Image (cartoon, grey):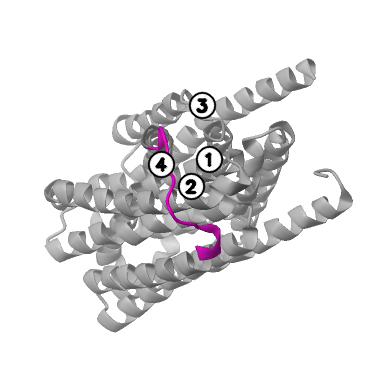
Amino acid sequence: MAGTPNSGRSLVSHTAIVALALALGQAAAYLVSVVAARALGPDQFGIFAALLGILLIGSVLAMGLQAVAARRLVHVTIAERGPVAASLMRAGLIGGLAVTAATLAVAPFLRWWLDISSWPVLVGVALTFVPLTWAGATYGVAQGREDYRRLAAAYALVGLGRGIGGVIGALVTGGVLGTIVGLLVGTTAGAIAARLIISPLVARPAAHLHRVVSETAHATHALLALFVLTNIDVLLARALLTAEDAGLYGVGVIVAKVAFWLPQFVGVVAFPRFADARRGRATVATVGAVFGIGVAVVGATALLPGLVVGIAGGPQYTALVPVAWIFAAAGAVFALGQALLLTRLAIDDRRAVIVVWSAAGLLVVLATWVLPHTVTGLVLSALIAGLALATVGVSAAVREVRLGKDHG
């Protein structure tokens, strides 16, 4: 049945609806950055960009739990799905509280390293991890059940809630604290709405799951390595560049994140297929699609850099125009690296994390000791590290596909 015309049309429909939902959520999220860049100014926006980097890195538990939930639900019987989903939802809430506690524990270090004077800002960031992680479990339940309509609705609700809250906070208060509080309130509202959407997929009593903590820890570790790699440059910008250049870099990161997140829907829809007999074909299709989208984004940015920078940050960030395409290229190669990592997480491969951490180490070395402490030097460090990761990942995927064909 997987190869019938009807199933093919169904896959296209599912991909389209997830892509639309992610686009809506991401557009709202990026609107927060665009509005904040104008409302806060370069210096304050540099702080806000660093805080967004912390939120992204801290959200890896949500993504790890999503991956484990989806993988688990692919392999359980129909009768087990509801109780397993209930257990995973509970794990999401507990995990969110744990990340909040951990963030509060390291808040003094973050305050010193990022030169942030406001304690309430860091508390607001920490509290945001509760709804973010809970939402990750919600996504995993819908994804594992391959119920892409509910998954799309959940993505859209959380993304729009977070974006609307952040925009209102930035416009009303004109400060970092108000923007963070807006993100917290909006994300919480979206997560609650998403949980209601997937309620038909959850049944009590919750099942007792073995090894879910271990599996989630390993998936989270791999995604943590990836998000350190894709976000450490924002934190390095705050530490290595002047306040003005850090603000410029923060706007450049908006361009990179568009290229990074734009093909995300491909891996989301393909992930359950990575975990079963559809794996080989899904890997080839995913790598090709993500690569093609990346080329299109980089090409468009190279052709219209002034327009891209104008939309991302406004006229006060025109210094980014000559290097805008490099930010897009860095985001595109990171997107390819993420897609390849998902193919490994779907089979609980625990070796790929070594390569990701190596790429992150390469980025830090290049940015800190090899290339100049400028906007261009830092983004080139990110691009080179991303290319290294993508090259290793593509090589491993090619070997696996070839072996599969030989064995077939």
The image quadrant that residue 207 belongs to is top left
For the magenta stretch, what is the residue range?
Answer: 199-212
First of labels 1, 4 by sequence position: 1
Name the side, left or right, on which 12 lies relative to 377: right
Which residue is identified by label 4?
208
Secondary structure of residue under mark 4 = loop
Q: Nearer the viewer, residue 402 or 173?
A: 402
> Three-letter amino acid code at disc 2?
Val
Residue 207 in magenta?
A: yes
Does residue 323 appear in the picture of this structure? no
Q: Which mark is residue 72?
A: 1
> Three-letter amino acid code at disc 1?
Arg
> Three-letter amino acid code at disc 4?
His
For the residue carrying disc 4, how many other residues have a C-alpha within 10 Å: few (<14), some (14-19), or many (20+)?
few
Where is the C terminus found, in terms of image quarters?
top right
Q: Are marks 1 and 3 in contact (CB under 8 Å)?
A: no
Name the side, left or right, on which 40 lies relative to 107: right
For the residues labelled 2 and 4, the Cα–Cα distance comes to: 8 Å
Which residue is identified by label 2?
84
Q: Is residue 165 above or below residue 201?
A: below
Q: Are marks 2 and 1 in contact (CB under 8 Å)?
A: yes
Secondary structure of residue under mark 2 = helix
- Camera-side mark, 1 or 4: 4
